[in-house]
Image (cartoon, helix red, strand yellow):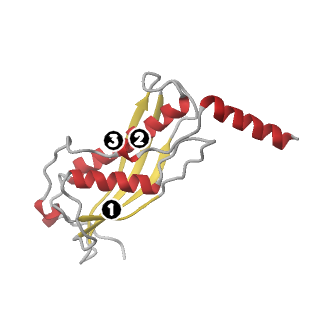
């Protein structure tokens, strides 16, 4: 009997307050309005090797940042900066590991902080050109959305977008010829 009560309460809450939705690509990607200057070696030379660490959104629980959606937002962001290679035969491979997405359980102002490890590798040599953990926060308030689940989704998207923007900013300072990060053997 308790099982049916629990399911009834969960379904009623979902109907009353809405379902959790995953972070959407269009709200995480960085567009052409962000205009950094990059080392010319990076132009049209980067592909995304992998994105890991994201979570699937359970509609009855809370909004999450999924691997596929984050990868698509990252790809679109690289494309907006003329960094994305048109084919898989690129010079550089980028991986992103979503290490942590710190979310509140509830609140009026919801701040989400994402920590993502980015690694850029020269494919022909295996040389690591960029290997940084980037942390970015975004706060969504009741002005953004009255519904708490929607507010959390907005905070997730804003944090992911801010994280990608910080990554692009740091990448713009990369001097490919002089990058020398060594991987332990």
The residue lying at 57 percent from left, 30 percent from top is 106
Q: Quadrant of residue 38?
A: bottom left
Quadrant of the rendered structure where residue 97 is? bottom left
* Percent x, y of residue 51: 41, 60
Mark 1 residue crowding within 10 angstroms, few (<14) / some (14–19) / many (20+): some
Question: Mark 2 or mark 3, which is nearer the start of the sequence?
Answer: 2
Distance from the alpha carbon under mark 1 to that under mark 2 = 21 Å
Which residue does the numbered mark 2 point to in the structure image? 157
Marks 1, 3: nearer the viewer: 3
* Residue lying at 39% horizontally and 35% vertically, measured from the top left: 138
Q: Is residue 112 visible?
A: no
- The residue depicted at 60 percent of the width and 44 percent of the height is 59
Residue denoted by label 1: 119
Q: Which label was assigned to residue 77? A: none
The Cα atoms of the two marked residues, 1 and 3, are separated by 17 Å
> Of residues 60 and 51, which is closer to you in this image?
60
Query: Which one is nearer the viewer's eye here, 38 or 178?
Result: 38
Q: Quadrant of the N terminus?
A: top right
Q: Residues within 10 Å of mark 3 (few under 14, many from 20)?
A: many
- The disc, 1 or 3, on the residue closer to the chain's N-terminal end is 1
Image position, residue 140 (x, y; %): 43, 29
The Cα–Cα distance between marks 3 and 2, rounded to whole angstroms, is: 9 Å
- Residue of label 3: 162
Specify the farthest residue to the front: 15
């Amino acid at each position: 009997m308790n099982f049916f009560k629990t399911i009834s309460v969960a379904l009623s809450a979902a109907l009353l307050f809405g379902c959790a939705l995953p972070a959407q690509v269009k709200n995480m990607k960085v567009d052409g309005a962000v205009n950094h200057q990059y080392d010319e070696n990076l132009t049209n030379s980067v592909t995304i090797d992998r994105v890991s660490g994201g979570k699937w959104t359970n509609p009855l629980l809370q909004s999450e940042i999924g691997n596929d959606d984050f990868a698509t937002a990252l790809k679109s962001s690289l494309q907006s900066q003329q960094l994305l290679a048109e084919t898989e035969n690129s010079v550089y491979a980028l991986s992103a590991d979503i290490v942590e997405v710190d979310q509140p359980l509830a609140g009026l102002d919801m701040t989400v902080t994402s920590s993502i490890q980015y690694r850029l590798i020269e494919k022909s040599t295996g040389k690591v050109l960029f290997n940084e953990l980037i942390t970015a926060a975004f706060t969504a308030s009741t002005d953004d959305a009255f519904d708490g689940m929607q507010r959390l989704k907005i905070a997730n998207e804003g944090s992911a977008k801010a994280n990608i923007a910080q990554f692009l900013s740091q990448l713009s300072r990369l001097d490919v010829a002089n990058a020398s990060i060594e991987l332990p053997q």
